[in-house]
């Protein structure tokens, strides 16, 4: 495929990873346990009983991975800092060995001509903080601001782009509502408290980053393009409820300083629950962003569905009278996610229409697909489906730019095959194939395609 989409000068092409998914070295150099270390040891929590103890061994092989990034030609590399490696208990002074690792990583990236982009929180809360209540408790937001200061004091002089939180929806609802992610809790209102405290932690971290002199600070949200299954009024109403829970519960506080309104009385009551909110919180949360990161993979097609538990006091916080269904006409990835690249353009257009000048510049901070990758005898990995996926979504980004949406960058998820959370090592998203038994890295055809696309931009 040689007719690549084109992008304006200065558009950032990058690749992304996350600490727990690639670093390994779980017990080395003073790193403390995180909620994912604990969760991965819960029987049945992770496919195959996998853990992140070794992952891609990036902690020891980061130089090799920097070389892959340099050869790929990316202008930026988005990685996350392990809170438990930097501050093992989630409080107190920093762990020098942990900070030194990220110091070496940043210097290595800069020497390779690659701009570092740091994510401060990609789901790996120190276990000791979870033992004290985790994100259900307001104090965790203040501990996050303290941790931000430790990392910023070490890296802010060389890292221009910072992301406070990655996908707080997953942390709050997959972690505290349905138990699919760490810490594996199945709760109701505490999940909404976690959502609020995550946003508060973001807001408290922003002035810390400003004081450290960082050039750009933002947040990465996994926003959905929500589509009703039919044009019937019940499905349309279900889509509005899904839009509230998946998107507006984040974008309204961040960009408008308010929680969304809801036609559903119970949801409206929960969204405006005062038991965990304080006066002034929304002012902190809505501090101006330099950019909004958007992680996007697939649309959400939803239909009306009854509560599984009819008691509004005990039902799960993620059980809001809608359920997702597939798109039979679309190709599905190895995650069984429908591929519909045009929906990314629609999502971006919808954000611009809703927020206007309040929408900051956008970076697509994650986009990619898990496919059924197998090396050929000649050592190639012919992942043509991934190339088609990336090409389609990049064309959708280019179309959004033409529509007037201020998109500044695009990061492929992911540089490497890695520990895919509850799926363990059973799903592969990487541009680079990882043989977990030997840790051999093998660039796939998509790696070479992305390199050619970047080079074609001049």
Image (cartoon, rainbow, N blue to C red):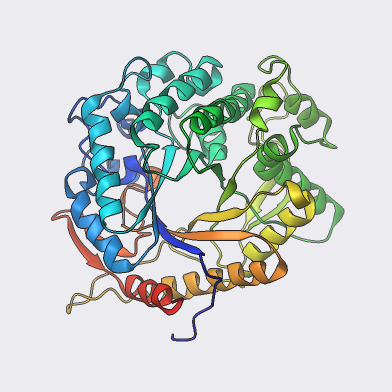
Question: Can residue 336 be seen?
Answer: no
Q: Is residue 3 left or right of residue 199?
A: left
Residue 401 as seen in the image, left or right of residue 112? right
Rendered view: 341 above or below 181: below
Whether 105 is drawn above or below 378: the answer is above
Camera-nearest residue between 235 and 101: 101
Can you see residue 93? yes
Q: Residue 239, position in %: x, y?
A: 75, 50
Quadrant assignment for the C terminus: bottom left
Return the x and y of residue 181 as percentages of the image width and height.
45, 36
Q: Is residue 400 above or below residue 248?
A: below
- Residue at horizontal 34 percent and vertical 45 percent from the top: 47
With 377 as the anchor, is 219 left or right in this view? right
Q: Is 409 or 223 nearer to us in this picture?
A: 409
Q: Quadrant of residue 286?
A: top right
Eyeballing the image, is 127 above or below 321?
above
- Residue at the (60%, 54%) spot, across then down: 362
Locate residue 144 relative to residue 28 in the image: left or right.
Answer: right
Quarter of the N terminus within the rendering: bottom left
Towards the viewer: 289 or 384 = 289
From this viewpoint, which residue is outermost toward the left? 438
Quadrant in the rendering for residue 98: top left
Residue at 47% x, 65% y: name it. Answer: 333
């Amino acid at each position: 495929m040689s007719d690549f989409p084109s992008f304006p000068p200065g558009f950032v092409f990058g690749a992304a990873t996350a600490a727990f998914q690639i670093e390994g070295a779980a017990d080395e150099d003073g790193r403390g346990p995180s909620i994912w270390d604990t969760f991965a040891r819960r029987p049945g929590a992770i496919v195959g009983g996998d853990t992140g103890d070794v992952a891609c061994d990036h902690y020891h092989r980061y130089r090799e991975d920097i070389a892959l990034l340099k050869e790929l030609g990316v202008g930026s590399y988005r990685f996350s800092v392990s809170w438990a490696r930097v501050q093992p208990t989630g409080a107190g002074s920093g762990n020098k060995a942990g900070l030194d690792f990220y110091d070496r990583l940043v210097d290595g990236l800069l020497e390779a001509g690659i701009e570092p982009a740091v994510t401060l929180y990609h789901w790996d809360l120190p276990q000791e903080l979870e033992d004290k209540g985790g994100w259900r408790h307001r104090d965790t937001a203040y501990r996050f601001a303290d941790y931000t200061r430790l990392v910023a004091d070490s890296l802010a002089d060389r890292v221009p782009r910072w992301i406070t939180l990655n996908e707080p929806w997953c942390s709050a609802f997959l972690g505290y509502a349905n138990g699919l992610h760490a810490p594996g809790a199945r709760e109701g209102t505490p999940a909404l408290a976690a959502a609020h405290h995550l946003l508060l932690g973001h807001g408290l971290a922003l002035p810390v980053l400003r004081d450290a002199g960082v050039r750009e600070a933002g947040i990465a949200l996994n926003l959905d393009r929500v589509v009703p299954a039919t044009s019937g009024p019940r499905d349309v109403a279900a889509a509005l409820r899904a839009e509230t829970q998946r998107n507006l519960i984040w974008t309204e506080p961040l960009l408008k300083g308010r929680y969304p309104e809801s036609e559903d009385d119970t949801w409206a009551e929960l969204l405006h629950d005062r038991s965990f909110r304080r006066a002034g919180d929304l002012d902190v949360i809505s501090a101006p962003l330099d950019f909004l990161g958007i992680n996007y993979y697939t649309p959400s097609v939803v239909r009306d569905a009854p509560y599984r538990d009819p008691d509004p006091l005990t039902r799960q916080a993620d059980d809001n009278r809608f359920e997702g269904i597939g798109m039979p006409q679309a190709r599905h990835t190895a995650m069984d996610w429908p591929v519909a690249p045009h929906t990314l353009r629609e999502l971006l257009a919808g954000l611009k229409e809703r927020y206007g000048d309040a929408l900051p510049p956008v970076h697509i901070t994650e986009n990619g697909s898990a496919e059924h990758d197998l090396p050929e005898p000649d050592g190639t990995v012919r992942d043509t489906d991934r190339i088609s996926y990336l090409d389609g979504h990049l064309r959708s980004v280019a179309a959004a730019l033409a529509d007037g949406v201020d998109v500044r960058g695009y990061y492929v998820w992911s540089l490497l095959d890695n520990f895919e959370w509850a799926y363990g090592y059973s799903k592969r998203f990487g541009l680079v194939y990882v043989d977990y038994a030997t840790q051999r890295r093998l660039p796939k055809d998509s790696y070479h395609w992305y390199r050619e696309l970047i080079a074609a931009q001049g």
